[in-house]
Image (cartoon, coloured by chain):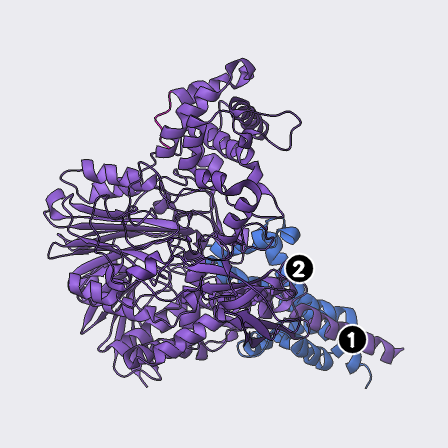
Amino acid sequence: MKYFKLLLSLAITIALIVALGSKIGQIPPFGKFLNPFTGFWQNAENVKAWKDEESSLDGLKEEVKVYFDDRLVPHVFAKNDEDLYYMQGYITAKFRLWQMEVQTHNAAGRVSEVAGEKALENDRLQRRIGMGYGAEKAEDFIKQDEPSRKLIAAYSNGVNAYIKNLKPKDYPLEYKLLDYSPEEWKPIKVALLLKNMANMLSVYEYDIENTNFIAKFGEENFGKLYPDFWPGDDPIIPIGTKYETPNTKSETNKTAEVRNLKSEMYANVLQKPDEINGSNNWAVSGTKTKSGKPILCNDPHLQLSLPSIWYEMHLVSPGMNVYGATLPGSPAVIIGFNDSISWGVTNAGRDVRDWYKLKFKDDSKNEYEYNGQWVNTEKRVEHYKVRGTAERIDTVLYTRFGPVVFDDSFGIAESKKYLAMRWTAHLPSNEFKTFYELNQGKNHDDYINALKTYTCPAQNFVFASRSGDIAIKEQGKFPIRNKATEQGKYLSDGTTSKDEWTDFIPAEANPHIENPERGFVSSANQHPTDSTYPYYYPGVGVYEQFRNRRINKLLADGKEIDVDFMKKMQNDNYNLFAQEALPIMLHCLDMSKVNSAFKPAIDKMLTWDYYDNPDSKAAVYFEEWWSTLRDWLWDEMSDPTYPMKRPNQMVTIKFLQTDSTSDFYDNKATRQKEKRNDIVTYSFQLAMQNIMEEYHHPDSIIDWGTHKATKVAHLAKQDAFSSLNVYNGGNNGIINATNGTHGPSWRMIVDEGAMKGYVVYPGGQSGNPGSKFYDNMVSSWARGEYFEANFVKQGDELGNKKLFTSTYKPK
Amino acid sequence: MKNFLLSIILTSIVSLLLQLFLPWWIIAVVAFVVAYFIKQNSIMAFLSAFTAIFLLWTIYAYMLSSANDNILVAKVAELMKALTKGSTTTLYLITGMVGGLVAGFGALTGSLAGKLK
């Protein structure tokens, strides 16, 4: 009996230790997680603990000083560039390690190593679209440029120096929650991170969606609903600008017959990221500013996340003094300014990804047809070390048209519809070099030189210099496309070379303008050019139709522009789309059928000033009505089996204005056949009913800021670590492009006259949910406030803005 | 009573020191050893170890959290809402109980082993 009791007690003790030490399903290991010596309590950062510190690190060449200011922005002062990037890696890891790793794990298709089986399908997808393959090509290419290789290696060494000294109690909270440990940082992860950006930003193509539409509704309808250009548009390069005729004329005008693949529909498409992934940037010349010197502005719109996608830094070495937003996981400043120039980016959104339908010789898929011959496929075997289960294997076939994303082993099973994907993110490239050169650029020539080799994701780089120049250039590698066949707009033929990419548009021919007469340059993801640009590009993408026109109007009207003008402008909530859409929507509304309880909503909209301000109620009615109308009107394009893209807003307004009887008005889910006014009226009724049900008192309690309830979500989707219900205005198509989940992820204004920068982002410098610097800027951001960047020449100049200094010495 | 208090003091102090560099479950080993050498009835051995670690863990957690202006404890209580209903007090109690139980069973085992002699 004594022994039995002893053994039982021992067994219970061991069982408790094992159970509380392991992660069970979603539940963290309680013993590990809750004990205050190594568990989450250790991440409860002492709010007053900031004090000067000194340490020595392996691999540093000389002493580096890092001054942290009162927002925890590091000002890194190094004596050479290798030390500078080493320290950038070290400091970024110190505050953002988990984020750096999870983002690159995601790019590499390795999340299932941490999250288990449920992440496997997404991991497979990442690998089948060749993220790792692209990163490997980039890494090989970077190695050919010794300075780039050396500096990326220095950055990686810095990250690893931090990881090496890390004890389990110091692990970022998410490691403890998910019960795993950080791994060594390798240089390829820098490339993976850029592929992650490419996969967010350079994927706006609708080849298969367009093909499906034509197969179902015909070419004529397609031409009407998906025009390449539309009247009244306002491209980045102003209308009427003359372009040089390319010498490769034969390329752009070739008229090879291509196989028509538009008679069949396809079930497999890749999910597109939010269409609001875009941005604004502009620069005004001294002729329009109070100071007589340029002002540059940029706000990239991305998914709002905690930790934020950006990490603010100031990097100083003998050859460089640069300030701005960095991407955790990549050396250099991505958007920012130095003492001579400033620059910012918006997404180009150009179609740089094409789909090819392949024909294999037999089920082995060892050979595919190309110009009448059988060519061997290459096989890349992908291994997945799925947590909690056995290793999985997936073989991806590679062809001259890129990886075969959809075949019998992936996607919805469709007989013989093998789709390969050609993408500029698979080209050998070195984006780091562009940013490194921009960071130390002095003038317009340096800027143009820096951009020359930049490949993917294509961006509109806006530029301003202290010496008074402004410019904008769309840069990326763009395939030369066949205009006659509208190559790249639809599914392409993968059995011949006729649809194949042969060459790329030379960097000199990419849209560019310097010091234009109108005194400003701008971009907001609209068309880069008008239709006279000599190189064809599909216009069915996500080209913006409203933000751009609003920006250009404000800048054209603006005089004596100063920083306050720009602050107001970046936070402008004017809804140009509503201004253009609401009159026709109200015109089509059949008042005899409108429920009288909803009439106050109409009155609100009739007196609306078209600002989506947080306290606006009319904005709630309009936005809900519009989104219901869009769903009902374009229900034909919501077939879950064969995906299509809905026509854009500009086209929709035109359609409502000019056609009142089209078959597209009929909602297929209802028995009767609707016409325009019916659908507009029903959608109004339904939207108002929904508002009524949600709020009970539709007229008295809701406003747009509350209704929209913007969420800055934690990267592991934990609400407890997210900023919920952030009260602010704006929406898609508005300069302040903040919807419920996406928006300006960084706002920057650079005054070249005073050499000052003003910045804010919806997050905080620390990635630790237990830090007071985790989300401390969210409310300032929501209110449209900024912080002046402490762009000092020496650390001591920080004065009482200095929180603490870290001194690092070589070991 | 003397042994009860002595056990609490020994278990908590030795656990405090060892946990600075050893994994969390070392508390079970400490409690086992203390209970093996300091004779008490098994229930008292369990209770003394439970009390020692319950106090050690909750007090230390409380100190860390106070210095943090309680930013994190509120978030984790929210994260573990299913258990805590969002209450930080409950989170402290769960923390103390987890440590207390493991140490308690370690002590119970130690006490039973001590009685074999």
Instruction: Residue A333 in the image: state x and y as whole percent.
Output: 29, 64
Instruction: Residue A267 in the image: state x and y as whole percent.
Output: 61, 53
Residue A9 seen from this side: yes
Q: In which quarter of the image is residue A794?
A: bottom left
Residue A516 vertical placement versus A766 (above, below): above
Give the color of chain B as drawn.
Answer: blue
Element at label 2? loop
Q: In which quarter of the image is the N terminus of chain A?
A: bottom right
* Residue hosting label 2: A415
Q: Residues within 10 Å of mark 1 (few under 14, many from 20)?
A: some
Q: In this view, does A534 lie to the left or right of A684?
A: left
Task: State the purple chain.
Answer: A
* Residue hosting label 1: A11
Q: Label 1 sits on what residue type?
A: Ala
Kindly identify which chain the residue marked by label 1 belongs to. A
Q: Going 57% across and 48% down the picture, which residue do you hit?
A: A643
Q: How crowded is mark 2: few (under 14 residues within 10 Å), some or many (20 or more)?
A: few
Kindly identify which chain the residue marked by label 2 belongs to. A
Residue A325 seen from this side: no
Q: Give the range drawn in magenta.
A: A607-613
Proximity of marks 1 and 2: CB atoms separated by less than 8 Å: no
Residue A797 vertical placement versus B110 (above, below): above
Q: For marks 1 and 2, give the CA distance.
A: 56 Å
> Front-most of A40 and A571?
A571
Element at label 1? helix
Q: Disc number at residue A669?
A: none
Q: In which quarter of the image is the C terminus of chain A?
A: bottom left
Q: Label 2 sits on what residue type?
A: Ser
The chief SS type of the magenta part is loop
Residue B1 vertical placement versus A593 (above, below): below
Q: In which quarter of the image is residue A357?
A: bottom right
> Front-most of A202 and A274?
A202
